Amino acid sequence: MVSGIQREKAELFLKYHHDKEILVLLNSWDTGSSKLIEASGFKVIATTSMGIAASLGYPDCQVIQLSEMIEVIKGIVNAVQVPVTVDIEAGYGNNINEIIDSVKKIIATGIVGINIEDSIELNPVLIDETEFCERISAIRALSDSLGFHLVINARTDSFYTSSGSQQEKLYESIKRGNKYREAGADCIFVQPVSEKETISTLVKEINAPINILVNPTIGAGLPLSVIELQDLGVARLSLGSGLMKATLALIKKVADELSGKGTYNILLDTLKPFPDAAMAYKMATGLNK
């Protein structure tokens, strides 16, 4: 059963996609990171599937068992007050019936939104668009039967996996985005794109709120700022696995310095000023309440 609180949070989350202000998601991977993000003022918690998998020692792409993923999600939902949306990759199932069974279990945790993608293990051949639309429609029907509006963020990996030209990838993303919207998706997630012209075209040509992934990488230059994306008409931006990767990178840097030089400079620099580090710990553990 879906509670009244879960229903209200779902409505609030859906509303955020249509506000003038862009919805910013700093993706989390466990209870502590979720509580810290909430305490930092973010109005929605969004998970990263890669982050959750990595925190349990798994690679990405649905290697983690659904039961393990659900236990993490439960912990997050029970620890925060804001709406929670989760990345369910390709749906944890090989067909519609299996996917619907998985989504039922995920909804039962108290979440109000999902990401679902049209590639499996980032295979260059995307799921047939008609079949993917059927999956979206089935999830929407399930949501309706439960009496609440699950916010579906449908991700197309046309840019990520296709070997075609940029124009061909753009055309495929627009075509799939509009079909997914018609099938019942609330938001269309296209990644990875960073050029202003491409993003502007996606916003204009896809009849739905657009989610853009901000994923800073070395050599790629700085990504567009929150204000720049908002001015382009983007409804939602997320960091995906970026924050988790940065955390792991910091651990590696500290470990390499300590084992190689026997010094602690990187760790000390990260902890400065110490009151900020102490406050972050309190926010992640709830001790600031």
Image (cartoon, helix red, strand yellow):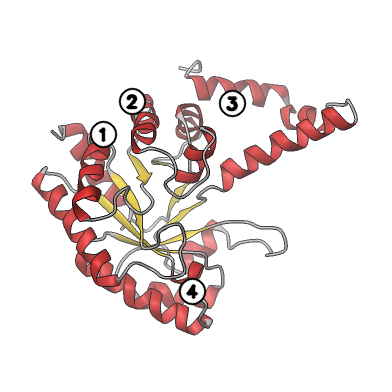
Q: Is residue 139 left or right of residue 227?
A: left
Q: Which residue is mark 2?
A: 78
Residue 162 tag number? 4
Decide which of tag 4 and tag 2 comes sooner along the chain. Answer: 2
The quarter of the picture where the N terminus appears is top left
Q: Are marks 1 and 2 in contact (CB under 8 Å)?
A: yes
| Type of amino acid at the residue the image marks with label 4 | Ser
The front one of 132 and 154 is 132
Circle 3 SS class? helix
The residue at the point 34 percent across, 38 percent down is 66
Quadrant hosting residue 204? bottom left
Image height of 225 relative to 239, above or below = below
Question: In front of the other: label 2 or label 3?
Answer: 2
Question: In front of the other: label 3 or label 4?
Answer: 4
Q: Which residue is mark 1?
A: 110
Cα distance between the residues tagged 2 and 3 = 20 Å
Q: Which residue is mark 3?
A: 280
The front one of 129 and 249 is 129
